[in-house]
Image (tube, rainbow, N blue to C red):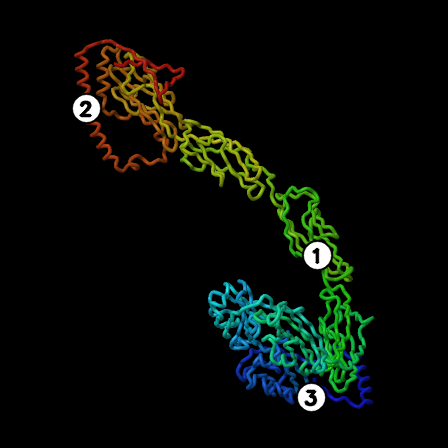
Amino acid sequence: MFQRRGPSPSRTGLILGWCILLLFSSPFCCVAHFSQAKELFYSIREGVPMGAFIGAIGQDLKLDFTVDPPFQFNLPQQKHSGQYVRLDNTTGDLYTSATELDRETLCPDGPTPQGCVLSLDVFVLPQQYFQLVKVKISVEDVNDNRPRFPVEEICVSIPENTPVNARFAVEQSAVDPDLHFNSVQTYWLVNDFGVFTLDVEENEGGELTPFLIVTEALDREMQAEYITDIIAEDGGTPPLLGTATLKIIITDVNDNCPRFTKLLINVTLQGNTSKGAHLARLHAFDPDLGANAQISYVYSERVPRETQRLFHLDQMSGLIKLAGKFNSETSKFYKLTVLAKGPGCIPAVATVNIHIHKVITAPPAVVPRYIAAERNGVVTMKESEAAFSPIAFFTVKNTDTSQKLDCHLEGFGPFRLTPYQQLQNEYLLETTKDLDYEETQEYELTVVTKGTSGGAVIKTFLKVHVLDENDNAPVFKQSFVEISVEENNPPNTFLFQLQATDLDSGAHGEVVYLLGGDAPGFFSVDRDTGVLSVTTALDREERETYRFMVRAVDQGTPRKESIATVLIRVEDRNDNTPRFINKDFTFFVPENFPGFGEIGVLSVTDADAGENGWVALSILNGSDVFVIDTGRGALRARTPLDREQQGTYELWVEAVDGGKPALSCATMVTVLLLDVNDNPPVVLFPQSNQSYMLVLPDTLPGTPVTEVYAVDRDTGMNAVIAYSIIKRKGAEPGSFVIDPETGNITLQRELSNRGLYSLLVRVSDHGQPEPLHATIMVNLFVNETVSNESYIQSLLTNEAEVVEVEERPWYVGQLTDRPRPFELFPCQPVLIALSVTCLGLLLVVIALASYICCRRIREHGGDGQEEVETPLNMNGGSVQLGDRKIRQMANI
């Protein structure tokens, strides 16, 4: 450490007084920063070439290089500067020097717990900018050393009667100065001869020892020795190998081998122990007699030659004496491995651990002076104290002026011990950052004072107790809580227990729980335990979620609090039955509605959610005619419906939800079929176009002579029938009229001629958009009697001449909006010509047939008159004409 020589003793007191005055009148943070030493850490791999950059001290210190005079950097330890590193005096940059950095050379005794570190002190000059910079360069290991055996040939003697699986340690194990995985990791044999194998064991110190294991029985008379190579391999990438010749000698053996009475001996020496002192005596015994019982004591090959020369081992007696001197100021540890060898025996192994303590000189004295409150070595500080608050002064009184003292702080915590300004052996203990009671309530510190050249170590123990203040708000374990509860819960149901902690102590850390202002009144929280409950039953259909805040408040002054958000989801239960929007449904559908067309939609609702609210519809009756779409509730018919077969359908439809157990409801659905004019009128009387009615020639005008009776299976206007004469033959126009409503045919004029009168009657309904009709030929035979029915039948058969239309149908002239026939059928003339041609051919055929029939009748003869009453059939069944009297028809 850089030091200045102090002034004269008389001025020293005066300066000390001024310093103490300034200490109590100035901010402590300024005092702490006056001469604070800086530490910089760098790392570099060993073996880098000369001139490799290590670090920029000036840049890392954040120095302003524009100041005048400029900064200068200096290395007081020239041995490191010239050998390993080079410092740029103007920029403070560190580089490697011409000497290659070798970790094994720099740290020959192995690395410290902090690794292999090269420590440098760098001075920042000139005086007004003076700083002492502690630079530590960690030298990282690389795999630059291959394992090496201490000897080129290793001899192992094995008795020929050695049992299978016996183990023999190969004492001359390989050494690799590299560290960790770069050191020796395994051993293996080039040739095991099918008799041996190699195993590796690791002791408590981390050392690997290869063991030769016998896998087959040995016979010295057949083969007295085996020679192979043993390979040591490290863990580097790529791995490096070390090789030695392994010579295995098979020897004759006796029955017993030497054994140590103690396998471990610990020896403690002072650093000033004189040469020739007896340190320990090892004793091994062999029950055999004569030459087989001779024992010799030797060091293992693991013990370095320098150590063997320092501690002399008598081969016959096993006595270990100090044969040299060692530095009394340096503590050191030696481990001696001693072998007891007998003729043809496996050596017995014992370990001697020698601990050397350094010589302690007169200790220095340390005088503490406390600035903070202190009692019995315990300093009390509030956690609100600012950083760099002073705690105590320590004055070191050195009784040995020939050596320099080192005073430093040991222990954990935000504290530091620094020299106070330029005063020698005065140190200030202060904080480096704010204290936190919640992090650590008490610190144990040790002020260690020792000489740089050795001697006694003086330790001054100190405890710093931190007083708690209310500087922490409660913290919820979960700031957001999501809770699920089933609806219809019983009152005072437990929901959740909120947990909040406060790192403060005492009343500062006591937490109470309160509901936020947005919480509904039927929720409650226990003030002390934080148990959240609901005092009433919840209904998901009324409200599905609740969101509010819970406060955690401590009891400090002033009070501090934190907030947690609670989200409660009310889970659904199947407590609502499905409901149709109507009590019942009525649908009006026109008949002949296409199959699977949508008749109507049955809307159903369920206030529940999820599967509980999923509703399936089914038809309880009539499922062979109708089908329902479960998704939309659409009712459809499987086939087209015919009103004339069935005009009304009454169905029961059930709605079942998906809950467990399922709830259901039912509704009645009425389907009314609306009539469509799809049936033409059917003439029941006359029965056919070949029927005729006898009319007496003296029938008075106004007398009903016959009637046309027809029915229509449709309803309404589609079933209202109108009758009209559209064609006539034989009768004068106006001779017969027909009632358009009843179908009664009345004689209008006196009949002047006898013979066959034919009236073509059109029977038409009032359907829309196009009326349907049927025609019937009404034949009236005017005569006193029917004397020759064959003649009448021939007249009916030969009736083929087209007569003019006398009367128009009842609806002609009423439908003014319809297009005329020739507008609908532009090819009407062609069709008429074809029709006339076909009709002519038909008449020729009918005339021929009538002629043939008349001739046969004349040949067979047979007069007479039969009255035939023919039943009226429709659709395979008899049709009752009510009170109407079917007039008697005479058929030949």
Q: Quadrant of residue 445?
A: bottom right
Residue type indicated by callout 3: Gln
Image check: 888 left or right of 49? left
Count neighbours of disc 2 (C-alpha within 10 A) and say few if under 14, some if 14 to 19, many if 20 or more: few
Q: Quadrant of residue 95?
A: bottom right
Q: In what quadrant of the picture does the C terminus appear?
A: top left
Residue type indicated by callout 1: Ala
Residue type indicated by callout 2: Val
Q: Of marks 2 and 3, which one's residue comes earlier in the chain?
A: 3
Q: Position of residue 225 (x, y in %)?
A: 49, 71
Q: Is residue 424 above or below residue 736?
A: below
Q: Is residue 30 visible?
A: no
Residue beneath disc 1:
500
Residue beneath disc 3:
127
Q: Quadrant of residue 881?
A: top left
Q: Of marks 1 and 3, which one's residue comes earlier in the chain?
A: 3
Q: Is residue 210 above or below residue 84?
A: above
Callout 2 touching callout 1 (CB < 8 Å): no
Element marked by disc 3: helix
Q: CA distance from mark 2 to mark 3?
A: 151 Å
Q: Position of residue 383 (x, y in %)?
A: 75, 68
Q: CA distance from mark 1 to mark 3?
A: 56 Å
In-front residue for pair 278/763: 278
Residue beneath disc 2:
845
Callout 1 touching callout 3 (CB < 8 Å): no
